[in-house]
Image: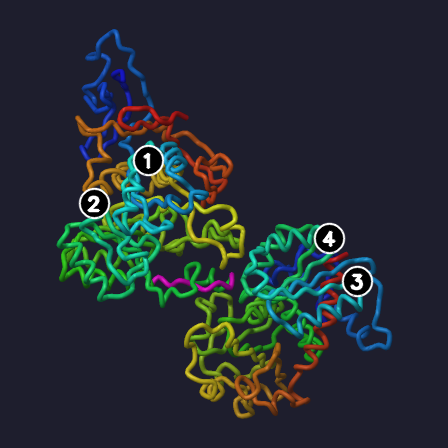
Amino acid sequence: MKKQYFINANILDPHNSINEVGGLIISEDGKIEAIGKKVNTNNLPTREKPIDLKGKYIFPGLVDMRVFVGEPGYEYKENFRTLSNAALSGGVTSVVTMPNTDPVIDNVSIVDFLRRRGRDKSKINIFPCASLTKNIEGTNMTEFGLLQGKGIIAFTDGVKTIQNPRLMSRIMNSAKDIGCLIMQHAEDYELAKNGMINSGIIATKLGLSGIPEIAERILIERDLTLLEKVKCRYHISQISSQKSLEVIKYRKEMVKFTSGVSINNLSLNENDIGDFKTFLKLSPPLRREEDRIALVQGLKDNLIDVIVSDHKPEDEESKRLTFSQAATGASGIETLLSLSLELYHNESLKLETIIRALTCNPAKILKINKGNLSIGNDADFCIVDIEKPWIVKKEKLISKSKNTSIEDKRLQGKVTNTFVKGKELFKL
Amino acid sequence: MAIKTDKAIKISQKHLLGIQDLSINDVNLILDEAHTFIKVNQSKNKKIDVLRGKTQINLFFEPSTRTQSSFELAGKRLGADVMSMNISNSAIKKGETLIDTAMTLNAMHPDIIVVRHQDSGACNLLSQKVNCAVLNAGDGRREHPTQALLDALTIINRKKKIEGLKIAICGDILHSRVARSNIYLLNMLGAEVNIIAPTNLMPKEIEKFGVNVFTDMKKGLKDCDIVMMLRLQNERMTSSFLSSNREYYEYYGLTPDKLEFAKSDALIMHPGPMNRGIEIDTILADDINKSVIKEQVELGVAVRMACLKMFCV
């Protein structure tokens, strides 16, 4: 690979506190050689023609902590190849994949398969999760130690929740012993039973059973209480309500944990469901506008660490059903950054806060050396025209499944190029 | 009689999916039309030819006796060719989706499809996929517009107006599409609506619909002109909502002593089928001076004739 030179970009790397106009040099082996304002035409060799990125931004490649890939079992929804193409178009260079596949990622041999497929078919960095319990049944623990040894980055039951408090406390003990990260999808099943959308006036109007916010809060309360005794690496996958944030704020002073939020919950509210739009059947559900505003504030106040896409590809047949029959989840990895930038353009959040929650914060929680532009690291980054207007069109999506939650939405800001290990793998 | 307006003579909607979508003008058009059909239904020759040559398909995914027969009779009296299909759950489990069923039927060129489905919003989905008009005969717990319209017609028939009346809706509001449609319609027509139910059977934030909420039946019935009882929908209850039927009867069953709190000329209504001795005292249910339950069924045919005519032609 030839050395590459970029100049005049707005470089934003929260990990290294870089927020300046400058350049970037990528070495022959795809590493970051130099970065920042000191890289400019004055100190580049004259024979090289640098790429002028005037007006554009360079961000570290995004780290998406919650992504569903259909391999194995649901390849018709998404495979590693289609996932990585979709991710690259959205500036995402590292993903944490959920274990909700068929078969479930719950034993060492399936991890071998997964890593092989990920390596052969994917162009981005794949960090697979294994399940907390065998077959995601919520009864018996998986082999955290052996699985971690095989390269499992974290443990979660994905769309499922550990309901049994005794099991949860034992999981925490094991996680502490082994030092692995566990991630919980916080929802009490009994309180959320049959629920499809946020409990409240919209649910009453549409005649759908509701999921009360308390179903989330009560589980977070329980887990954080358990965490007081066992200090393991614990992460709440997604928070959806104002009340959950109050609990988090209160507990932050006592125990150490981290939490995430889906871009859907940051950008949309329950009113967007309109006339039974099944693409907006999500878990956790979209809640009130007050909740959405509180979540944005939670990012500002560092109560929430991470923004995730909660990318859950579902084929047409799983969504062209009545609301109660339709599958849960929305495809979103390729619009994650653009939709997040909406929060910058409407002055809800600082650009740095957004990029931090999409790059170095998840990397720190996962303990991976990604999501930064440190010298000597893999050159995983994206070039973004943050002003460029565009409209989300279902048929233009790259992901195999087209179930976007923001069809026809006008967005501002688009990734123009994405690099992984110094190689340009996406160009608009 | 409903208020006459000379603004529009056509319904603003293509489908009858819910009362929510109707304007007051639409409602008055339907009620006026229905009124004319009451006499037709009481006469010797009940057949008129307005829907001659039209095809009506009744698509019932959920068991129903009165609504289905009412729609069937209404269609036949208007001269339409009526086909009733009962699609049990097992047929859906064979793999055909609602949309596929809709497409199949659509290919047969019906003029109107009447749908009942256990899922809220099923009619909305179906209406997007077919070319003909869709009439909602009850979807999940969302809406049952023709029931609300026939209730309104019954009230108007007896009380000559709805505006200014105080109407109590009592019972299993949570699972009731009848309650929701009635709340929309009665509010629109200017009634004051009291909702009475135990908290476990009260939908969230129902007060935002512009109704008065009561858990004490006696307070809720105070000075009411109409007492609308709802059926306890045990088949929709998946977990413990109530301790027992006898306790429910004690607190929320309509009994003569509770009815005392309503106006002396208050009318009793019930969409049927009734659980006698659970939500309503059996003698009250049959009291011809107070109960208009049979009249509701009678006028139901008239209302459905009006709906079929207005949405079909």
Task: Determine the CA span between mark 4 and mark 1.
Answer: 49 Å
The residue located at (47%, 68%) in the rendering is B206
| Disc marking residue B80 | 3
Q: Are marks 3 and 1 on the same chain?
A: no
* Chain letter for the residue marked with disc 4 in the picture: B
**Pointer 1: what residue?**
A92
Give how far across and how far down residue B61 sits, in percent.
Answer: 60, 65
**Pointer 2: what residue?**
A365
| Disc marking residue B108 | 4
Q: Amino acid at mark 4?
A: Met
Q: Amino acid at mark 1?
A: Val
Helix, strand, or loop for circle 4?
loop
- Residue A212 located within the stretch drawn in magenta: yes
The residue located at (80%, 65%) in the rendering is B78
Q: Is residue B149 left or right of residue B73?
A: left
The answer to whether marks 4 and 1 mark residues whose Cβ atoms lie closer than 8 Å is no
Q: Are marks 4 and 1 on the same chain?
A: no
The residue located at (31%, 52%) in the rendering is A238
The answer to whether marks 4 and 3 mark residues whose Cβ atoms lie closer than 8 Å is no
